[in-house]
Amino acid sequence: MAKLEKDGHLDEFDRKILTLLSKDGRMPVTDLAKNLGLSKSPCAVRLKRLINDGFILGFKAILNPVKLDLNHVAFVEVKLNDTKESALQAFNEAVAGVPEIEQCHMIAGAFDYLLKVRTKDIENYRQVLGESISGLPHVASSSTYVSMESVKDGVS
């Protein structure tokens, strides 16, 4: 069975599997094996280990926001009025319940969180900001930056 190298790092086959799957998560094991120069069984064992060891967190469909009429992207800086652990936890839990918030990052800087919000249009965004984001626990203020174009988004 494939093992991690002695220093705890992935070997070249493992890294290649991760690279290939990051470009095409639906690649069949037979194609992975062919690209690696391995037979199917050792490749499948490596893939299973990478999943079990948490290197691969899952597989998902990447949806087309244009087809779903979700063209508007805004980034929102959020400042909280309380940054005790209980307040942060309350905010984190509430954010999970707002479907329009695509990403939420705690930030070290002049504000506390950066949100990526995807909506149909500016009117819909304004509603989400007023009814959902501003009502999240401990929100003191927010600043919005509207994306004009996505130059690089991590989707191949």
Image (cartoon, helix red, strand yellow):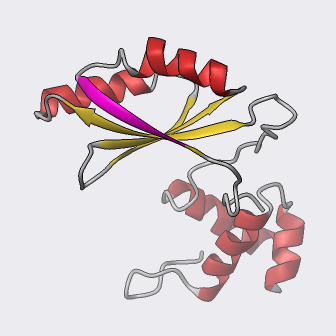
Does residue 31 sit above or below 93 in this rendering? below
Q: Quadrant of the C terminus?
A: bottom right
Residue at (75, 71) in percent of width and height = 20
Residue 121: give x, y in percent of width and height. Answer: 70, 27
Question: Where does the image place residue 11, in percent across and percent down from the top left?
Answer: 56, 85
Q: Compared to 142, does 99 lie above or below?
A: above
The question of residue 140 being in magenta is answered with yes
Q: Residue furthest top?
A: 131
Residue 10 point in image, percent of width and height: 52, 80
Residue 38 visible in the snapshot: no
Q: Quadrant of the N terminus?
A: bottom right
Q: Nearer the viewer, residue 38 or 106?
A: 106
Query: 34 or 70, which lies in front?
Result: 70
Residue at screen point 87% across, 34% down: 67
What residue appears at the point 35 percent right and 33 percent down from the top-left corner? 142
User: Percent from the top left, x then y, of residue 36?
Assistant: 79, 83
Q: The magenta stretch spans which residues? A: 139-145
Point 59% across, 24% down: residue: 125
Give left or right: position of 88 versus 114.
left
